[in-house]
Image: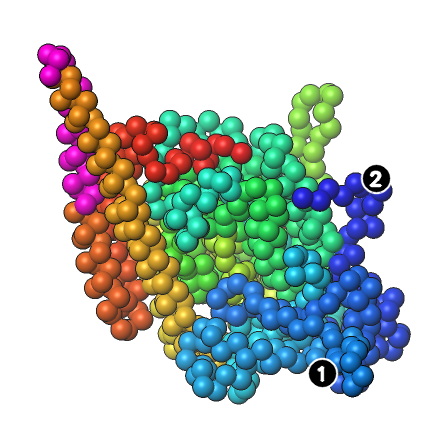
Amino acid sequence: MSIVDFTKTPVAALYGSHCFSNAVMRERLPKNIYKEILAVQRGEKELTLEVAEVVAAAMRDWALTQGASHYTHWFHPLTGLTAEKHDSFIAPTPDGRVIMEFSGKELIKGEPDASSFPSGGLRATFEARGYTAWDVTSPAFLKQDQTGTTLCIPTAFISYYGQALDKKVPLLKSIDALSKQAIRVLRALGNESSKRVYTTVGPEQEYFLVDKTLYDTRPDLILTGRTVFGSMPAKGQEMEDHYFGAIKERVAGFMRELNTELWKVGIAAKTQHNEVAPNQFEIAPVFTTTTAAVDANQLVMETIKSVARRHGMEGLLHEKPFAGVNGSGKHNNWSMATDDGINLFEPGENPESNARFLFFAAAVVEAVDRYALLIRASAATAANDHRLGANEAPPAIVSIFFGGPLTEILDNIAEGKSSAKSEGGQVIKLGVTSLPNLPKDVSDRNRTSPFAFTGNKFEFRMVGSSQSIATPNTYLNVAVAQVLSEFADKLEQAANKNEAIQSIIKESYAKHRRVVFNGNGYAEEWMREAERRGLPNVRNAVDALSVLIQSETIALFEAHQVFSKDEMESRYHIYLEKYAKQINIEAGVTIDMARRYLFPAATSYAGTLAQDAAALAAVGATNIPQAKQVKRIAELAAELYDETAKLEAVLAEAQEVEDPFSKAKVYGEKVRPAMDAVRSRGDGLEKLVAKHAWPFPGYEELLFKL
Ligand code: ADP
Ligand code: MG
């Protein structure tokens, strides 16, 4: 634990001290080189080796003065995690010393071998060549831990044949694709100044904290990040007393250090609060450009874990660590902005006459309707299946919330009516003189919508807490790019631009407004209403992933040069495999815990009760509750025993299946229910067996002790 005294080291001085940001580059690089780097960041130029040499030297000097001994190309393999392989800067000299070296070549290209990462068949292990290439759009940073200080260079990971082996390359390509189409639209709308359009992203990260000593006693938490057994205590989240509650001392200490660590590497950690479930929390940084936000979110997740350990806790990023209370998600706040600072989703005070806003908003509506399955697939994981559609997270139905006023404006366009001029600068009147009146937002909030417009950005809420946000953003960017390209085609050809703008919005919105829903997304009626509207409701990840290999999807990604057919198919297989592997581990842990911990605990406690009962009977006691209790326990223990055997049989069957889709299906449809059956017996026993005789800490400790 290290506590930084902000009176001695002000936050502004600490911020970014471990980040090779543009500010540092501007300071440390010759002017012409810095300009080159900016041009490369904007996608206007390619990086030359000469420029890289100069940057590498500056980066090395900067890192060495901060005590770095190693560097690493830091990348995002398809595991969804990050990967690093450290190299020291040392280069031995003939006379037995070392100098600290770092060349331009070492900066721009690495060859980590890395043949054991999933490639979904893109790369056979015997041809292990995989390369990492510097991603100039995301800043290098220093990582400090027991290995010392390491310079981390964000990179993309590609195969010898140039296929993307990671999540970064497709993301970068999707941003390019979106920019290209958005610029076409902007030009057609009369904008001559913007050169590039960026997507901006601000992810809100939810997580749980548990006491480390408790965590260490539970094989399920250690191996899977979630509890596969555990019965709800008398109290859950029903009092709604945790959400936004005062932050406990121990957690506060953790949050302070978490912020400090993130600020150092230039991540603008901004918001923190208690979440709905007990011991659940959230952190949100200020939004930034998408690649930087994606990298930052990976670091946020890593840092939550490492800082939690320093505070004797464990950070759980799993989507559903505890049954019976809310799981964790990641709200992907997403918008589009031009290089000259225009947020394309800023409605302004008069949205009804803001053609640019309405045009881009209509494009998003159409994209979300047409590519709902793809958007759903971007959040399809085994762990997220516990959340989506479980009345705590958005339903598995993809819909958009716009709020009353904006929906009315769009509806009016679709119906050819004109909208009343909105009164700019409306305020919410509080009617209490001591309180200021608040400026009114053009839309209200809706917490139940998977894709909610929240003032000047969209909040995509399906993403799971442990997921990399690279893939959801990639799909989203491509979906919107496609619609914008079609809009641009029409607009560019139109003789009368103003009429064309109107008619494009009108036609598109009339056709796709079925995806707009402002009501309660958790309600039963919405399921029926959505079905009536023909909106897909794909409840499980395995089915949701199928869209990835449909020919239209592949054509879409090929058209925008984001994924080739091979790359898409490889990902499909990797996701299916990951789904199966995850459940395979959980089922294995369930069997192990049931057999080696729960069953022995229950039977030995039953034995004790039986002895007590016999002893009581021997002295002539007539009322012997122990006898009743022992019967109940014995019955449930026998069921636990049988259900465990059934699970084992089903698991063996699943393990034999070869075809990835069928295999994932068996895991989802047979192994999972069999696990649930074991769990319900185990949880039943937990309620009957004496606390001191139970082998694990229960939810009352895990969820309430900190
Ligand atoms: P909420 O009220 O939805 O919980 P938070 O303040 O927790 O909001 O998080 C909102 C997130 O949205 C922050 O990360 C914020 O920086 C981000 N955000 C704000 N404006 C934009 C934008 N234009 N593009 C992307 N993200 C944005
Ligand atoms: Mg929030």
In the image, 9 versus 543, the foreground residue is 9
Residue 67 location (% of width, % of height): 78, 62
Within-10-Å neighbours for mark 1: few <14, some 14–19, many 20+: some
- Asked whether the beta carbons under mark 2 and mark 1 sit within 8 Å of each other, the answer is no
Asked whether residue 485 is in view, the answer is no
Quick one: which residue is furthest to the front in this view?
96
Tell me if 588 is positioned left or right of 516 in this view. Answer: left
What percent of the width, then of the height, locates residue 690?
30, 28
Specify the segment rendered in magenta: 618-641
Could you say which quadrant of the image residue 628 lies in? top left
Name the side, left or right, on which 238 lies relative to 613.
Answer: right
Q: Secondary structure at mark 1?
A: helix
Q: The disc labelled 1 sits on which kind of residue?
A: Lys
Residue under the point 13% across and 22% down: 614
How was the colour assigned to the protein in this rendering?
rainbow
Residue for badge 1 = 105
* Among the 4 quarters of the image, the one containing residue 607: top left
Tell me what residue is drawn at x 47 percent, y 75 percent. 116
Which is the main secondary structure of the residues drawn in magenta? helix
Q: Badge 2 is on which residue?
A: 7
Residue 54 in the image: x percent, y percent?
82, 79
In front: 555, or 620? 620
* Mark 2 within 8 Å of ligand 1, using the beta carbon: no
